[in-house]
Amino acid sequence: MSMQNMNTVNAPKTSSFQMRINPEIKSQAESIFATYGLSLTDAVNIFIQQSLNVKGLPFLLSPENAEYMKAKSVQRLISEIQSGWDSVKSESDWVSEEDAYKLLEADV
């Protein structure tokens, strides 16, 4: 099995780690996870898998998450649009809407 196809569900479990946590906090967390049918180990594995999926933390570390995401999305959109404009060097670089649909194999 290649590393690319491995995830926390099907990867061999041959390593372990320990962590220290307050017993009351651990109990509260276990109770929350249990309502979803998960153990603490399951929840940690889900966190790790999602971190691998997004190649970072699976959540934002900001109290202004919605505003941050909007600003980040707008910034990315503007950057993508500018990249598109900058890529045009001559008239032949333009692609018609019809040709774009054909390239994307999309139905009009």
Image (cartoon, grey):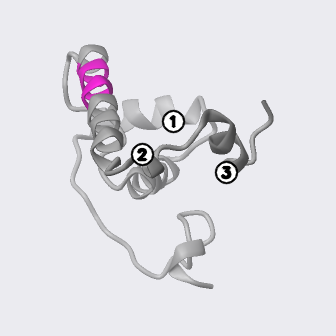
Helix, strand or loop at disc 3?
helix
Single out the mark in the foreground, 3 or 2: 2
Foreground residue, 51 or 90? 90
Give me the residue at 66% from left, 44% from top: 99
| Mark 3 / mark 2, whichever is N-terminal | 2
| Dot label at residue 103 | 3
Magenta segment: does it hold 74? yes
Give me the residue at 41% from left, 58% from top: 52
Assign the magenta stretch its main secondary structure. Answer: helix
Single out the mark in the foreground, 1 or 3: 3
**Kind of residue at disc 1:** Phe
Give me the residue at 28% from left, 64% from top: 18
The residue where tag 2 is placed is 91
Give me the residue at 35% from left, 47% from top: 88
> Residue 29: x, y in percent?
40, 34
Foreground residue, 88 or 47? 88
> Residue 12: x, y in percent?
56, 79
Looking at the rendering, the stretch of residues picked out in magenta corresponds to 68-75
> Residue 36: x, y in percent?
61, 33
Q: Quadrant of the N terminus?
A: bottom right
**Kind of residue at disc 2:** Glu
Single out the mark in the foreground, 2 or 1: 2
